[in-house]
């Protein structure tokens, strides 16, 4: 099925009109050279179709009229000039408690139109993101962004598309071998959703919200490195999201010349010590930092050194494992942070563990039956082995107990879930037919624990 794909080019100051069902995005292009001009720019329109399963190349469509406008890339010398903050309605940014995964909802209204953006969709083995959206009466999304194709970030995109009216889906362009990635791409193809692969330097005005793409510039094949990272400006209040981008990507963003300073930073990679370097923190210089992680997760996120880096700089720190869902409300001039639970985040001590205060559960009662949809049935002989390792739910340490699996392959397995059968392990780099035969003959792995 062909999809209509919209890309808004940086040069030419083009204007485009989005689907009428979600309303017009109204904006003005900020440029030093035409700031005082009253002339309206005219653009040519072109429409091309793309089959995303055969080809991942970007084609463009732009229409003359009011709509989403792409701005010149922001630099330190050319920051975005947004709408006056005293004219803005309240915007809420929900850092949703989805366990060891990521999902953030942005909602605001402007001149009678409601705008809704979702960044990441939680893990594949749950339905908590859809439930959260429905509980807040969210029925449409203007943009759905999957920062990178790991299952804890794109895990419920197919469910969201099936249950909500989604206008556009943005993905990094990196591909994965996991079943959930294929389900996501099938859901995009089978719907009427528009598709885009954003690149660093692209800028958009979505009503009063300014959105600047910080990463990726080009893809390297490293899924974390290719994470879609962005800066949002709402009046005078700004936010940065970096997915699972790690130190090398943070360094590239810092050297890019793009405007990084922001009030609120979502910590990269769930608070892992592979991200949130001192240099990047200094470049962003946030007042508030927020991370998404599951209580007592197997990775030890957030890592102690990251907690120390953040708190030593006097930055307020919030985490979904401690505070539950965190909501930032802003009128474009000031902002407030509210949490579902109280708690303090401090580095671990020998007796106290990582945190003090209340801890948020990573599971919801609504998720109890979600594994049945994802796991499928495994007809391999290993499924009847009593003590096999369930590759769809085991920790990295448990996976490393399987022959031929070290830390690197265990992490790749976790990010490639879900699997429909043990035979799917052949998708893991270095697990060929011979090694797969060893695993199956010993009954070391199974799906569903049967």
Image (cartoon, rainbow, N blue to C red):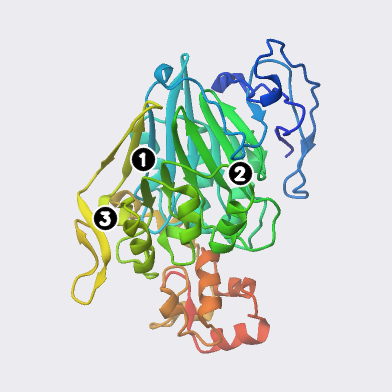
Picture layout, residue 319 above or below residue 332: below
**Marks 3 and 1, the one that precedes in the sequence:** 1
**Along the line of sight, which residue is nearer the eye, 430 or 242?**
242
Q: Position of residue 415 (x, y in %)?
A: 52, 65
**Along the line of sight, which residue is nearer the eye, 293 or 34?**
34
Picture layout, residue 1 above or below residue 382: above
State the residue lying farthest toward the front. Answer: 77
**Marks 3 and 2, the one that precedes in the sequence:** 2
Is residue 68 toward the left or the right of residue 138 in the image?
A: right
Is residue 74 toward the left or the right of residue 164 in the image?
A: right
For the residues labelled 3 and 1, the Cα–Cα distance comes to 18 Å
Provide the residue designation for mark 2.
258
Picture layout, residue 344 above or below residue 386: above
Q: Residues within 10 Å of mark 2 (few under 14, many from 20)?
A: many
SS of the residue under disc 3: helix
SS of the residue under disc 1: helix
Question: Quick check: marks 2 and 1 in contact, CB under 8 Å?
Answer: no
Q: Position of residue 351 (x, y in %)?
A: 18, 75
SS of the residue under disc 2: loop
Q: Of the numbered discs in the image, which one, if any, rests on residue 276? A: none
Question: Quick check: marks 3 and 1 in contact, CB under 8 Å?
Answer: no
Q: Foreground mark, 3 or 2?
A: 2
Which quarter of the rendered picture does the C terminus lie within? bottom left
Provide the residue designation for mark 1.
132
Residue 433 falls in image quadrant: bottom right
What residue is shown at x 50% (from left), y 55% (from top)? 280
Count of numbered tags: 3
For the residues labelled 3 and 2, the Cα–Cα distance comes to 33 Å
For the residues labelled 2 and 1, the Cα–Cα distance comes to 33 Å
Is residue 450 toward the left or the right of residue 179 in the image?
A: left
Which quarter of the rendered picture does the N terminus lie within? top right
Provide the residue designation for mark 3.
322
């Amino acid at each position: 099925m062909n999809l209509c794909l919209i890309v808004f080019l940086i040069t030419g100051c083009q204007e485009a009109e989005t689907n009428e069902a979600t309303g017009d995005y109204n904006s003005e292009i900020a440029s030093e050279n035409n700031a005082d001009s009253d002339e309206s720019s005219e653009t040519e329109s072109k429409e091309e179709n793309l089959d995303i399963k055969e080809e991942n190349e970007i084609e463009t469509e732009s229409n003359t009229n009011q709509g989403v406008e792409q701005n010149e890339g922001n630099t330190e010398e050319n920051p975005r000039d947004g709408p006056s903050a005293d004219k803005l309605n309240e915007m809420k940014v929900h850092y949703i408690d989805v366990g060891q995964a990521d999902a953030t909802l942005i909602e605001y209204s402007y001149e009678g139109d409601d705008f809704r953006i979702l960044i990441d969709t939680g893990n594949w083995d749950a339905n908590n993101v859809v439930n959260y959206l429905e509980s807040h009466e969210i029925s449409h999304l203007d943009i759905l962004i999957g920062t990178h194709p790991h299952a804890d970030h794109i895990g419920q995109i197919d469910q969201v598309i099936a249950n909500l009216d989604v206008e556009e889906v943005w993905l990094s362009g990196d591909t994965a071998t996991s079943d959930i990635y294929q389900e996501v791409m099938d859901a995009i193809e089978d719907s009427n959703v528009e598709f885009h692969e954003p690149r660093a330097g692209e800028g958009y005005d979505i009503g009063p919200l300014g959105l600047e793409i910080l990463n990726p510039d080009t893809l390297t094949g490293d899924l974390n490195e290719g994470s879609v990272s962005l800066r949002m400006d709402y009046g005078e209040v700004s936010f940065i999201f970096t997915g699972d981008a790690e130190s090398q990507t943070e360094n590239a963003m810092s050297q890019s010349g793009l405007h990084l300073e922001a009030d609120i930073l979502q910590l990269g990679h769930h608070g892992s010590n592979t991200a949130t370097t001192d240099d990047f923190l200094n470049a962003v210089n946030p007042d508030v930092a927020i991370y998404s992680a599951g209580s007592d997760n197997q990775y030890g996120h957030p890592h102690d050194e990251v907690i120390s880096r953040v708190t030593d700089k006097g930055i307020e720190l919030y985490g979904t494992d401690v505070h539950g869902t965190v909501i930032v409300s802003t009128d474009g001039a000031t902002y407030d942070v509210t949490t579902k639970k109280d708690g303090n985040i401090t580095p671990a001590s020998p007796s106290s563990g990582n945190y003090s205060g209340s801890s948020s559960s990573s599971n919801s009662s609504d998720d109890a039956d979600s594994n049945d949809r994802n796991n499928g049935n495994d007809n391999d002989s290993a499924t009847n082995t009593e003590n096999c390792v369930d590759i769809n739910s085991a920790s990295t340490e448990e996976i490393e107990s399987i022959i031929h699996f070290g830390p690197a392959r265990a992490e790749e397995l976790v990010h490639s879930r879900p699997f429909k059968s043990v035979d799917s392990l052949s998708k893991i780099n270095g697990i060929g037919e011979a090694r797969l035969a060893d695993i199956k003959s010993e009954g070391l792995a199974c799906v569903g624990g049967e």
